[in-house]
Image (spheres, rainbow, N blue to C red):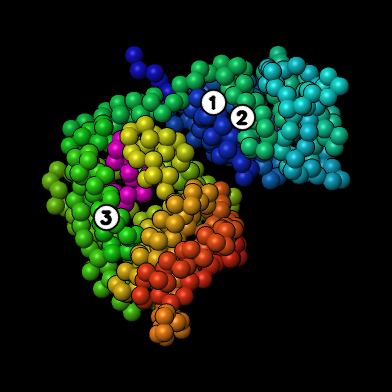
Amino acid sequence: MRTDIHQQAILIVDFGSQTTQLIARRVREAGVYSQIHAWDRLDNLNAGPENEPENGPDYRRFAGIILSGGPESATAGNAPPVPAALFAAGLPVLGICYGMQAMARQFGGTVQAANSGEFGHAQVKIEADSPLFTDLADHIEQQNRLLDVWMSHGDRVTQLPPGFHLLASTAACPIAGMEDPARRFYGLQFHPEVTHSRQGARIIQQFVREICGCPPRWTPANIIDQSIAQIRAQVGSERVLLALSGGVDSSVTAALLERAIGDQLQCVFVDNGLLRKAEAEQVMAMFADQRGLNVRHVNAADEFLARLKGITDPEAKRKIIGQTFIEIFEREATRIAGLNWLAQGTIYPDVIESAGAASNKAHLIKSHHNVGGLPAHMQLKLLEPLSELFKDEVRQIGLELGLPPDRIYRHPFPGPGLGVRILGEVRQTYADLLREADAIFIAELQAADLYQKVSQAFAVFLPVKSVGVVGDGRRYEYVIALRAVETSDFMTAHWAQLPYDFLEQVSRRIINEIPGISRVVYDISSKPPATIEWE
Ligand code: XMP
């Protein structure tokens, strides 16, 4: 019988912490499925037809609950509450930071604002044996077990609620962990979900595996198995269309659908003339040639460039590129007989962000860059086989499905492509020069083993001319800017401190090998205030 990977899942109640998604990822890395729901939208848990809304959220679907941290003060009158029914469900509950404070307050403990907060590294002393801490210690001093952890709090619990005992302490925070073993309620003031907490992943693993009793079922092979069964059940013998961009999400969607429904999948790959060097050939080789996938390669470069002629405003360019893509895609779709489904590479963070946007929360929202979907009149049903997965899980699945690692671990590439990396008006000649420069930069990064050390790297075309000398001749040509950043979430980023001799090598090659370029500069702006892309 197939393993049900969704059985015995962990509910994560989000109080608005920046690290809620990390909690969900750590739970999944422990092999257990997790779902994030905002504290004020727990009614969504009622989705099942058998649930009467008046019965309240159905917590018993889960094997355990984690309460996230959050920006609110647990001492404030309007602090987000934890529903009493959640604690009454008989499930193990782990409160982290705000989650611990809310739990303490709810059960009669005291929470106070401290004079000074605690932010960054700390060492906690384990005060009592607990299944959370079995066999864990970073240091042992005078027979005390110590853990290196990450703290980020102003408030703290100053008096334990009845029934709880002390689990951990720091000098600045005498109650840094608490436990009520009878009810299986646990609180941690520090953040086990961040990697700076060295044993954090193991603490979360002990909670979900030992305390909640969840077996490790959430593995790439099981996820693929179950997704395939689900796709087949959903789609039956109908046909599915997918816009294949060659990016990780659409590539993994294609590989998964191919495995599930084979020939019923039709992909469309639109070359907008703003792709990187050899991109179209590589994508076609990977999917159509090697895997025999149905891919229609539409070369629409002329159409895109014609529509972009004379347009200099970045947002106007984005709109034109997005709109043109939709029109072409729609045109292609109507040629395919008996089409019923549109597949999209939506991933879990997109789903969480949309839910957050719907509930009007400011945190976690990153503007969506994805192509805006198809017009409603096409009336296709939507198939989103990756919508439960985080990006790193999508990558794991891609590898398991046999996609090449260098495609799976590529830097992100924006939907409008080189269109936002050619400043001002987009011209074919500019795009051709930029493609060459970008290819040199990326090849050199790979050769120097630096490609995976930066999060995103690319060249930008500046349509201004600058003087240079090559041999005895004077040159008056264009400028290329190199951009490389380090970031974990693309919302903030540092410019990458690439070695000078490396930059020199890239600059020399670009100027020597590309006649239309006379100067190369390196972008040393971080985000904020600059953005990663130049437009
Ligand atoms: P910015 O420039 O906003 O970029 O700091 C953050 C991340 O988003 C990518 N990006 C885009 N992706 N369509 C996309 O699909 C876009 O219009 C777009 N603009 C920026 C950018 O490459 C970086 O990874």
Q: Is mark 1 on a helix, strand or loop?
A: loop
Residue carrying label 1: 30
Q: Residue at 33% across / 79% down in the picture?
A: 310
Residue 439 numbered mark, or none: none
For the N terminus, the image quarter is top left
Report how far apart the C-alphas of labels 2 and 1 lie in the structure.
8 Å
Q: Which one is in front in this view, the residue at disc 3 or the one at disc 2?
A: 3
Mark count: 3
Where, by quadrant of the figure, is residue 88 drawn? top right
Tell me if label 2 and label 1 are in contact, CB under 8 Å: yes
Residue 173, relative to residue 312: is it above or below?
above
Q: Residues within 10 Å of mark 1 (few under 14, many from 20)?
A: many
174 above or below 311?
above
Q: What stretch is highlighted in magenta?
A: 240-256
Q: Residue at x 26, y 31 (%)?
A: 260
Residue count near mark 3 (Cα–Cα under 10 Å), binned few <14, some 14–19, many ≥20 = many
Residue to which mark 3 is pinned: 280
Instruction: Identify which amino acid the numbered label 2 is placed on.
Output: Ala
Magenta segment: does it hold 246?
A: yes
Q: Which residue is drawn at 32% across and 69% down?
A: 432
Asked if residue 376 can be seen in this view, the reply is no
